[in-house]
Image (cartoon, helix red, strand yellow):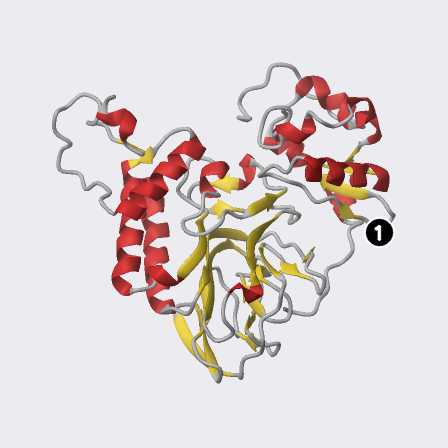
Amino acid sequence: MSLASRLPYDHPYAGGYPGIGSQPLPTDADAIDYLTRMATADGAGVEVGVATAVDAFFKDAKESGVFSSIRASCVLAGARTLAGALVPLRGDAPTPYGFVSGDYSRTDGLRDPGGTSYLNTNVRDDDYPQDDFHMAGYSTASGTYMLSSFDSSALSGGGGNAFLCRTSTPFYRSTNTVGFDGLTRSESSRYFVRTQSTTVERADVSAEPVDIPIYAFCRSDAAGNPAAITAIGIAFYSIGTSLDLAALDSHISSYVTAIGAAL
Amino acid sequence: MPDDIETTPLPENPATVADLLPHLPVPYHYARQYACVFSQELAERLIAIQEEQPQQFRVTPLPMTDGRFLIRGALLSEVPNGLYGHNFQRLDASRFDEIELAPWAEAVALLPQPDPVEP
C-alpha cells in the first residue's frame, strides 16, 4: 500500500517521492483520527492546508486546556462534502434534518437559505451538570438561533441577541454580528458570555437543566420539538463542560481563517 | 448534482414531483425554487418510513396554516441516489403526482409565523 493511499489527506509528494518535503503535516493523533473519519465520509482526504488547520486546532485546544471540555462538536467547514462535515470532532454525530449538499460551503459552513433545516445535536440539556456547562458556535450568516434547548440554554447567532446559560432570564447583547459566540458556567452564581471578541460576566443564579434536546439552527419548544428554524450559517459548534471561551474563540477563529486561506 | 451537468431541459413549471421523475436528481439551484406540498396522510407516511429504517439524513414535514405539509424542494437534488436516496426509493412512486411543487415563496408564506419571544 502506498503512503499516499494511507494518508487521510492529499499530499503532492506522498505518491512518488521518497521524502515528504518541508511542508508541515498533521502530527496530533486525535487530529489524524478525525481526518481519517472525515476522509471515509468524504470519499477522499482533504488538502494538506485543511489538514494542517485541523491539526493546529487540535494542538491549540489541547495546549489551552479547552479540548477536554469539548464533548460534542462538529466543524462544519473544511471537509469536502456535507457528510464529511457532519463527522463529529468529538462526541456523537448530529442528525441532519433537511440539509442537502448544496447548502454546504467548505469555507462558509452549513446554511439552508430557506430556513427549514436543522440539526439535532443528539445532546440533551441535562447531559451536563447544572454548573459545569458550555455552548459555543461560529456563525457565518445571520439567523436567530445557533444552539438552543428550551428556557434553559440558548446561544444566539448573528441575527439574534439573547443568551441563556442554565437560566430562564436572558442576557441581551446590544448589537448582532456573525462570528464566534459562546457561553459557559462553572459556578452557580454567575456565567460568562463571549460575543464580538468580548467576554461579559452575567450575575445570575443557575437553574436545573431540562431534559430537552439541544438543536442547532433552531430552538426547542416545551415538548422538545424543533421550533423557529432559522436561516443562520454555522461553521462550528461545541457543547460540553465549562471552558475558557476566549481560548476557544481564538482557536476556531484561526481555523476558519486558515480554511479560507487554504481553499 | 453539479449545476453545470444538464442532459435534458428541465420543466419550467412542474406541477408535481411526478413531472420531475425523469430528471432526478435536479440541480440544487433549480430545486430550491420549489416546495413539495402534500397532505397530512402523506406526511405521516413519510415519517413512518423514516422511523422504520432510520437513516443519517432525515426530513421533517412542516405543517402549513392550511392543513397541508411541506418539505423543501432542494431535497430533489439528493434523490434518487443521493443523501436522501434510501428512503426516497421506499416511497410509493404511484403517489408522486399527489406531491405538489409550489413556488417556494408562496409555500413558505403559509408556514406559521415563529414565536417572536426570544429565546
The single residue placed furthest to the right in the displayed view is: B66
Q: Position of residue B92 (x, y in %)?
A: 78, 25
- Of residues B110 and A225, which is closer to you in this image? A225
The amino acid marked with disc number 1 is Thr
Q: Position of residue B23 (x, y in %)?
A: 67, 19
Residue B72 seen by the camera: no
- Determine the image quadrant of residue B54: top right
Q: How many numbered marks, from 0 up?
A: 1
- Of residues A171 and B42, which is closer to you in this image? B42
Horizontal side of B60 relative to B95 (left or right) equals left
Q: Position of residue A121 (x, y in %)?
A: 55, 53
Crowd rating for badge 1 (residues with CA inside 10 Å; few <14, some 14–19, many 20+): few
Q: Chain of mark 1?
A: B
- Which residue is painted at 43% across and 66% down in the image? A241
Quadrant of image for the N terminus of chain A: top left
Above or below, comparing residue A33 to residue A72 in the picture: above
- Which residue is painted at 17% across and 38% down in the image? A23
- Name the residue that disc number 1 marks: B65
Quadrant of image for the C terminus of chain A: top left
The single residue placed furthest to the top in the displayed view is: B7
Circle 1 SS class: loop
- Which residue is painted at 87% across and 47% down in the image? B67
Q: Position of residue B107 (x, y in %)?
A: 78, 43
Horizontal side of B63 relative to A146 (left or right) equals right
Above or below, comparing residue A183 to residue A109 in the picture: below
Horizontal side of A236 relative to B39 (left or right) equals left
Residue A23 seen by the camera: yes
- Determine the image quadrant of residue A48: top left
Above or below, comparing residue A130 to residue A211 in the picture: below
- Which residue is painted at 63% across and 28% down in the image? B86
